[in-house]
Each structure stands twice: as C-alpha cells, then as structure tokens.
Amino acid sequence: MSKIIDESKIENLGTKGNPHCSAGKAPERASWRTFKPVIDYKKCIKCYLCWLHCPDVAYNINEEGFPVCDGTTCKGCLICKEICPVKCISSEREKRE
C-alpha cells in the first residue's frame, strides 16, 4: 500500500490550513517573556536562519535585508540565538516597569 497522496486530491486551504499565525496577529507575549533576542547587525550575515526557524513567526526582514524581531510576537524561546551561525544574536533580560 502506497503512502503517497494523489496531488489532485489535496485541497489548498490557504492561510486557513496554516498552523502558524501571521506575525503581528499573535497575542501579546512581551508581558510574560523573561528574555528577548538582541541582534548585533555589525555581525549579521543575513543568512535568515533566525527567520526560518522561529516557531512564532516573529521575524520580519527590513528594507536593508536584515532580520528584525517583532517584540510583541516573540515569546523569548531564543531558538534564533542557538541557530545563528555567527552568534550575532544575544539575549537580554526583559525590563519590567
């Protein structure tokens, strides 16, 4: 028995079928995050691994091509820090007012 799915039977659900939320539409997470990522753009090589591996879809690319973390979407898991090949991402304790 083949486990290959016939492509003609696959329905495109668009964003309805996407398990990730779009950046900016997730609940505010900065209020309970302990650490946040900080990027040193002098070291960044624009590999986009942080953008690719972020489970919260918290990274966007700015006009200069650098990844920028959306602080409202980021939960502070710091996977981006671990995956960065040049270690340009560090962590900073979230400041509370």
Image (spheres, rainbow, N blue to C red):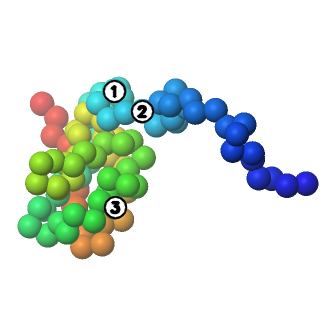
Q: CA distance from mark 3 to mark 2?
A: 19 Å
When asked about the image quadrant of residue 47, the answer is bottom left
Q: Give the quadrant of residue 11.
A: top right
The amino acid on which the numbered mark 1 sits, given as a three-letter code, is Lys
Could you say whether the residue bearing mark 3 is in a helix, strand or loop? Answer: helix
Q: Position of residue 45 (x, y in %)?
A: 20, 69
Residue 77, position as x, y percentages in the image? 37, 49
Where the C terminus falls, by quadrant? Answer: top left
The residue that mark 1 highlights is: 25
Tell me the amino acid under the disc marked 3: Leu
Q: Is residue 63 found left or right of 55 in the rendered image?
A: left
Q: Residue at x 20, y 43 (%)?
A: 94
At which x and y percent is residue 33? 30, 39
Give amino acid for label 2. Answer: Cys
Vertical comparison of 27 with 83: above or below: above
| Residue labelled with disc 2 | 21
Q: CA distance from mark 1 to mark 3?
A: 22 Å
Helix, strand or loop at label 1? It is loop
Residue at 75% from the left image edge and 45% from the top image edge = 6
* Residue at the image position 11 percent from the left and 54 percent from the top: 64
- Name the residue that disc number 3 marks: 49
Q: Nearer the viewer, residue 3 or 74?
A: 3
